[in-house]
Image: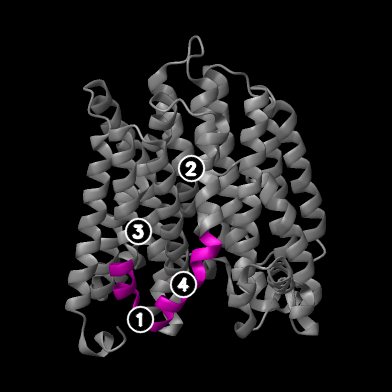
Amino acid sequence: MTVFSPPLLFQRLGAFVGEFHPRALPTMLRTNYAHELYSGMLMPLMLGALEGGTMAIVVKKMFTGVEGVDPTTVDYAVAAVSAAPNVANLSSFVWAALAHGKPKVAFISGLQLLTCACVLLAAFVPVNTLGLLLLVALVMISRIAWTGVITVRAVVWRHNYPRASRAIIAGRMATVQSLVLALAGLLIGSALDLRADSFRYLFPALALTGVIANSIWRKVRLRGQRGLQLAEIESGSGAARIDPRHLLHLLRDDRLYARFMWWMSVFGLGSLMVGPPQVLVLNDQFHTSYLEGILVTTVIPLVVMPLAIPIWSRLLSKQHVVAFRAVHGWTFVLGSGAIWLAALLDSMTLMYASSVMLGIGFAGGSLAWNLGHHDFAPAHRDSEYMAVHVTLNGIRGAIAPFLAVLLYDPLTRLGAGPWFFMLCMLVNLAGVLGFRAMRRNLPPRIAAET
């Protein structure tokens, strides 16, 4: 029974924390990594104000019942803030072009400050229809800006860290971000439950943490920056752009990848449709507080993700991404099914259980999102294959939340709202069955990997 002894637990906790310390890396990597790590411990506090699930709860609860604000407008605003992260993916090519030939650290720093400004301005929106529209606009602008941070930061990581260390560093950053985002969700939910207008003080404080994090980030140095900048300038700005027609040609030429993208679109549509109606049912049926709603939509999934990532990582490393998706997809089938039963049976326990299941699913999805296209792409076309995936995800991310509200609201008026989640479950199931059919019919050279 010594497994549960306090000294051993503290020893294991210390070992876990120790893995994130800069000294765990080679000397030449420590300085930049330390700046990124310490910045990464503060920046997610600011980002927590923009996280899709958190902001969806805030929008729904803050503007529901406000005189002069149409309830349907509120529901579509929930869809908009839920869609924002995926819609923002479509801007990644624009940011790649704009950053071409420019100092990368300064460029990222400017986008971080723009994101902080959006959080600060959100504290001053009036609680009326105009304020609702302004809040949605600020969320969209901030998510687009942060997409630029992620896009250009990949260049910094590629030049600052060797390939062997890059995945480890990315994993640590993702773990830190998910845990701090969960903490931010708890903070925002608790504050808004104490005082509905506390966002007017809390959001400026969160924006300030972002500014402090930015001051730490600016100390990062890009190795070979001058040479990279000159090479980009000499190559011309067109080198940073990807012609959309070329993406269509890729799908036409690689039929297997096109089929995978089709089933990803079917599966992803079901997954992305769940979010906005889940927020609506939490508020309208379960009458949750800010904290309870944010726990379901944000905190629980974010806490579960770091625990589940190592399990999914081992599975993905052993098999082709098609075989991985054929297994991983069941988590979303079960998650949407649990929401359906929760709404049908009026069970908050099942709603919490769905959050755990979706958190497990998000963990596997985050790995497959970043690495899955490698199983199809030749090394020299890696960015093109990822561009196809990002673009299609952005398109379905722009459609799914609004389609969800369009279907859910009429069903609710007919007294059949919970059955919407059964539809999501069936769409997820169709995607999983599509992956399973693909796995059975993979070409021999690929089937050997599964």
Does the magenta run of residues contain 1?
no
Which portion, as a residue range, is magenta? 305-327
Q: Which residue is mark 4?
A: 311
Task: Judge left or right: residue 333 versus residue 171.
Answer: left
Upstream in the sequence, badge 1 or badge 4?
Answer: 4
* Disc marking residue 331: 3
- What colouring does the structure picture have? one colour
* Mark 2, residue position: 297
How many angstroms separate mark 3 from mark 1 (CA)?
A: 18 Å
Above or below 389: residue 200? above
Q: CA distance from mark 2 to mark 1?
A: 31 Å
User: What amino acid type is highlighted by mark number 3?
Assistant: Thr
- As helix, strand or loop, the secondary structure at mark 1 comes to loop
- Residue visible at 47% across and 74% down? 313
As shown in the figure, which amino acid type bears the numbered disc 4? Ile
Quadrant of the snapshot with the C terminus: bottom left
Give left or right: position of 164 versus 399: right
Give residue 215's position: percent from left, percent from top: 82, 54
Vertical order, 447 against 108 (above or below) = below
In this orientation, does residue 68 appear?
yes
x then y, percent, for residue 14:
74, 70
Whole-number angstrom distance, CA of label 3 to CA of label 2: 16 Å
Residue, far top: 67
Q: CA distance from mark 3 to mark 4?
A: 13 Å
Residue tagged 1: 319
- Seen from the viewer's position, the closer of residues 429 and 78 is 429
First in residue order: circle 4 vs circle 2: 2
Determine which quarter of the picture holds residue 154. bottom right
